[in-house]
Image: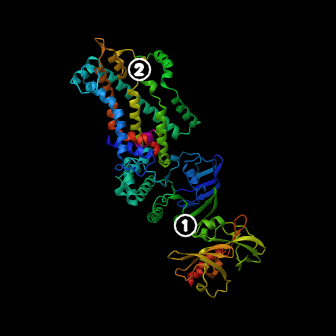
């Protein structure tokens, strides 16, 4: 049970700045996921937390104890690696007990009891007497998890633990990790480049890019209220469409369409992602963000009084559960997610409408979000009103 | 032997860039002929030595003389017992084992320090270690001779072992191997609080078994074949090693004629320990040499 605090944490490798002064509070028992593209500094942050890298600047606190310069073994954390990091010449049992025996903090009976408990929790009793070479990837990762949990650490640090597994096993292990966390309630920091893993596992998700934190929020809030273009495009697959527009008198004007922007009682600036409060009345360049699933083909919502946008279909990709249309709206290319089995052919022009509650505006230069057509506040209300219908 | 041949065949195929025929079955008759010629070139002198060692005088003047004689037992007995060749071999064995064990200990520690510790200018240190490879051992003989005398080590096993214990080659091979061990394994040990000695004994060494055995064989053969230095520093016959002992056999002239059969019996005997080791440990040896192929 541990809270972890990072204050202005920096890490430089020669001229390269891997982590550019991040501040983060990880709550007690929380499952926090750090997600970002390769080279964004997420793994370095985790390694700084583990003590495997020395910080260039800033502080790391665990339960208000400064651990910045403390040796990895004295931080009482356990780490799970992408390549499992099992000792190849040791059996599963010896792999699990080797570290505990080395630390000398546990009696033999205690170790024995903990191994049995962990083996049962993870269903690896059969693997204890096998060497890693006789285990599958999933089994190896289970044993590696076993090695982490037997020590009852203050925090689990996981560095892309599922990346080496095949797709099916990954989904299975993902569920298992979630179950394990709810059973153990140990503070967990989980690093991944896979946004699905981040969204499904994280109680909160940290999106990182270029050594900086872009946004920290609950998964749904990241999706609904991205703080900037990076988060908007990184979270969600297919990515959010980004359409350059001019803002004139509360409307978004594009060569091919003009959309009224619903006024928001509570501007984006006051919500938690801290976007700037640019008045929508002024003429300015901006980028309009609409997710592919927030476009609708007209027959789905025929009488909504919303303007129609003409989109020329270039390519259609049937995904089974939906149909993805690669379109052009004016000179802008755009993805639209339609219902499966929609009768649309490539080359056709379709007239689409959109969900007015799901519009986002980003600053054309900085990329910061300054407008979400639905505020956090109204989301809750709408959810309630939808639920009551 | 069969594995060695197959390995050589594969290598030969790969060197010719001829990947299509790189199978153990598809080698052409020409390849076989080349290989047999090579094997013949290597084995012929050894076979001659073996045959001569079984003859009475061992003088070979025609091909017809290359038939095994009936003096094998007598010759080997004479070399081992009368000329105390057994003693020389024992000395050689002791010297080689001390050198191998000493080299392993020093090299494992050195490579571990170079790979896993934050040592200032460690690349420079490693480069300096490699630099020692440029100095042939005989260059050091005169100062070394002086040093051994000053230490009072001349004529002892210390004089023929200690100067060989530091080995740039071994440090290099072990360093390369340690670098190939995934860092996450090292880091897991760090997080678990596994101390450096425990890490070395229970993680690093078991994970390096093959390389250690391979390197040991190479070092053993190298140590076993030492000739010049023992010749210089050891002057009592009781402490002499087999390679120099051979010369002693040669120096014994019977009736104005050199007893070649005795010399060849001695040579065959000195060949046996390295040969046995090579045969027993051929697999790890090949693995060590194939490091670059990974």
Number of residues whose C-alpha sits closer than 10 Å to that of mark 1, classed few (under 14), some (14–19) or many (20 or more): many
The reply to whether dot 2 and dot 1 touch (C-beta < 8 Å) is no
Between the residue at mark 2 and the residue at mark 1, the CA separation in whole angstroms equals: 72 Å
Reading the image, the residue beneath label 1 is A199
Side of B71 relative to B285 (left or right): left
Helix, strand or loop status at disc 1: helix
Looking at the image, residue B223 sits to the left or right of residue A320; the answer is left
Q: Which residue is mark 2?
A: B230
Q: Quadrant of residue B207?
A: top left
Local packing at callout 2 (Cα closer than 10 Å; few below 14, some 14-19, many 20+) is: many
Indicate the position of residue A264 as horizontal and vertical percent values.
Answer: 70, 76
Q: Looking at the picture, how far across and down is residue B42, in whole percent?
A: 36, 33
A183 over B198 or under it: above or below: below
Residue sitting at 49 percent across and 61 percent down?
A185
Residue furthest out toward the bottom: A303
Magenta residues?
B197-206
Q: In the figure, residue A363 lies in which quadrant? A: bottom right
Is residue B13 positioned above or below B38 on the image? below
Q: Residue furthest top?
A: B255
The percent position of residue A301, horizontal first and vertical second, equals 60, 85
């Amino acid at each position: 049970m541990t809270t972890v605090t990072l204050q202005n944490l920096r890490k430089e490798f020669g001229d390269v700045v891997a982590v550019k002064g991040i501040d983060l509070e990880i709550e007690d028992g929380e499952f926090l996921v750090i997600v970002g593209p390769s080279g964004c500094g997420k793994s370095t942050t985790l390694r700084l937390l583990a003590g495997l890298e020395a910080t260039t600047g800033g502080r790391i606190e665990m339960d208000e104890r400064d651990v910045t310069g403390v040796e990895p073994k004295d931080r009482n954390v356990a780490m799970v690696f992408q390549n499992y990091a099992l000792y190849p010449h040791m059996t599963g049992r010896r792999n699990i007990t080797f570290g505990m025996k080395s630390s000398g903090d546990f009696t033999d009976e205690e170790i024995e009891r903990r191994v049995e408990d962990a083996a049962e929790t993870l269903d690896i009793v059969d693997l204890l007497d096998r060497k890693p070479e006789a285990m599958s990837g999933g089994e190896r990762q289970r044993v590696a998890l076993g090695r982490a949990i037997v020590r009852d650490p203050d925090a689990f640090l996981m560095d892309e633990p599922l990346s080496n597994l095949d797709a099916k096993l990954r989904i299975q292990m993902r569920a298992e990790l979630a179950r394990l966390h709810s059973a153990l309630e140990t503070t967990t920091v989980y690093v991944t480049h896979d946004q699905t893993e981040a969204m499904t596992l994280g109680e909160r998700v940290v999106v990182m890019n270029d050594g900086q934190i872009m946004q920290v929020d609950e998964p749904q809030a990241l999706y609904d209220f991205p703080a900037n273009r990076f988060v908007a495009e990184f979270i969600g697959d297919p990515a959010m469409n980004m359409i350059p527009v001019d803002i004139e008198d509360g409307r978004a004007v594009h060569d091919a369409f003009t959309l009224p922007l619903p006024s928001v009682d509570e501007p984006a600036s006051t919500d938690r992602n801290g976007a700037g409060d640019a008045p929508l009345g002024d003429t300015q360049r901006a980028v309009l963000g609409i997710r592919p699933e927030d476009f609708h083909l007209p027959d789905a919502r025929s009488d909504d009084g919303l303007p129609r946008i003409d989109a020329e279909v270039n390519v259609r990709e049937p995904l089974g559960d939906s149909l993805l249309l690669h379109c052009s709206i004016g000179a802008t290319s755009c993805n639209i997610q339609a219902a499966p089995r929609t009768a649309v052919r490539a080359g056709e022009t379709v007239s689409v409408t959109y969900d007015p509650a799901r519009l986002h505006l980003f600053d054309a230069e900085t990329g910061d979000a300054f407008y979400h057509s639905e505020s956090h506040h109204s989301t809750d209300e709408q959810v309630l009103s939808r639920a009551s219908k | 032997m069969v594995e060695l041949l197959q390995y050589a065949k594969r290598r030969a195929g790969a060197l010719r860039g001829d990947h299509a025929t790189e199978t153990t079955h598809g080698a052409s008759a020409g390849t076989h002929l080349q290989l047999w010629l090579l094997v013949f070139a290597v084995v012929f002198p050894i076979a001659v030595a073996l045959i001569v060692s079984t003859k009475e005088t061992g003088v070979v003047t025609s091909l017809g003389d290359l038939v095994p004689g009936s003096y094998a037992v007598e010759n080997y007995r004479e070399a081992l017992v009368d000329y105390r060749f057994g003693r020389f071999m024992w000395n050689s064995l002791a010297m080689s084992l001390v050198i191998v064990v000493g080299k392993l200990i020093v090299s494992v520690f050195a490579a571990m320090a170079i790979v896993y510790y934050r040592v200032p200018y460690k690349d420079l240190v490693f480069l300096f270690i490699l630099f020692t490879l440029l100095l042939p051992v005989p260059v050091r003989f005169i100062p070394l001779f002086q040093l051994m005398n000053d230490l009072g080590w001349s004529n002892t096993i210390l004089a023929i072992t200690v100067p060989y214990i530091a080995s740039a080659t071994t440090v290099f091979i072990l360093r390369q191997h340690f670098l190939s061990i995934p860092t996450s394994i090292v880091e897991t040990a760090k997080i678990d609080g596994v101390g450096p000695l425990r890490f070395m004994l229970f993680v690093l060494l078991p994970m390096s078994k093959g390389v250690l055995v391979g390197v040991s064989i190479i070092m053993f053969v190298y140590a076993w074949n030492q000739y010049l230095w023992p010749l210089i520093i050891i002057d009592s016959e009781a402490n002499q090693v087999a390679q120099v002992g051979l010369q002693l056999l040669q120096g014994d002239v019977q009736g104005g004629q050199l007893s070649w059969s005795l010399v060849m019996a001695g040579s065959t005997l000195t060949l046996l320990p390295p040969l046995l080791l090579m045969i027993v440990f051929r697999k790890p040896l090949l693995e060590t040499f194939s490091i670059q192929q990974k």
